[in-house]
Image (tube, grey):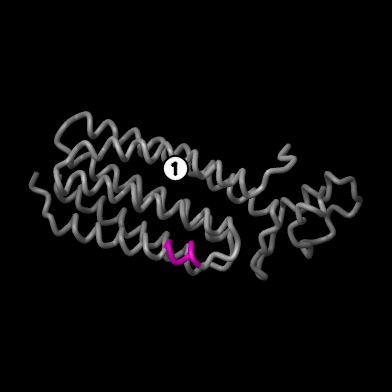
Amino acid sequence: MTVIISIAILLGSALMVLAAVGVVRLPDVYARLQAGTKAASLGLALIFLGTALASDGRTGAVKLVLAALFQFATAPVAAHVIGRAAYLSGAPQWEGTVVDELADAFRTDAGRADADGGPDEGPPSAAGRA
Amino acid sequence: MDLPLIVLDVALGALAISFLLALVRVALGPTAADRAAAADVCLFALVATFALLAIRTEAPSLLDGVLVVTLLGFLATVALARLLYRGEDDR
């Protein structure tokens, strides 16, 4: 039991460090969101699992499991909302970005014929779209 | 609780490192969305620190803090994102 708890806690904190390293080193907002959300969610869930197994009372374990479940439910939503706000406010993309499906959606929706014109266009600025 | 304390100490140190690294991105971040994402990671590290400290110091009331901060952090992130772009968000 102690071994399982130790592995969960250490693996979780290692994942948190990886998430922070990714947030510092990755090139643009969208990649940083990937690192920050996915790695940190799994790391946090592992730490919560370890502490829930290690806590003495039953209520503490229930609280931690609830927190972990809520974390898994809300972290993707939060990252999606931030990423969308970043895109709509015109955050720059990394120059190696290959696919920008949201730009195609915007162009098709604006009624232009060249919806498949290629990914050479940056994110639309909020002023230019309105 | 026979969990070796060195495990908790190492994990707490790693969480402090990740908090500081994410804080670097909060300070640097070119756009506000960078800062929001990094602040989210900071909050995760803080919550995990709460959970580990509840075990380390045998203070189970800290677990209430874990639950509350997890709930409020989501609201704070969404509010921040709304602040970044408030427009015709009809998609």
The chain identifier of the residue carrying mark 1 reads B
Residue located 69% across and 54% down the image: A89
Residue located 82% across and 54% down the image: A128
Q: Which amino acid lies under the numbered mark 1 shown in the image of this protein?
A: Gly
Residue ID for mark 1: B73
Q: Is residue B4 left or right of residue B53?
A: left
Looking at the image, residue B9 lies above or below residue A26: above
Q: Quadrant of residue B69?
A: top left
- Residue B42 % position (x, y): 41, 55
Q: Quadrant of residue A94?
A: bottom right
Q: Nearer the viewer, residue A5 or B34?
A: B34
- Residue A115 % position (x, y): 85, 52
Q: Is residue B32 left or right of residue A58?
A: right
Determine crowd level at label 1: few under 14, some 14-19, many 20+ residues with C-alpha closer than 10 A.
Answer: many
Residue located 36% across and 51% down the image: A43
- Residue B87 % position (x, y): 72, 43
Q: Is residue B23 magenta?
A: yes
Q: Secondary structure at mark 1?
A: helix
Looking at the image, residue B58 lies above or below residue B21: above
Per the rendered image, the range of residues in magenta is: B22-27
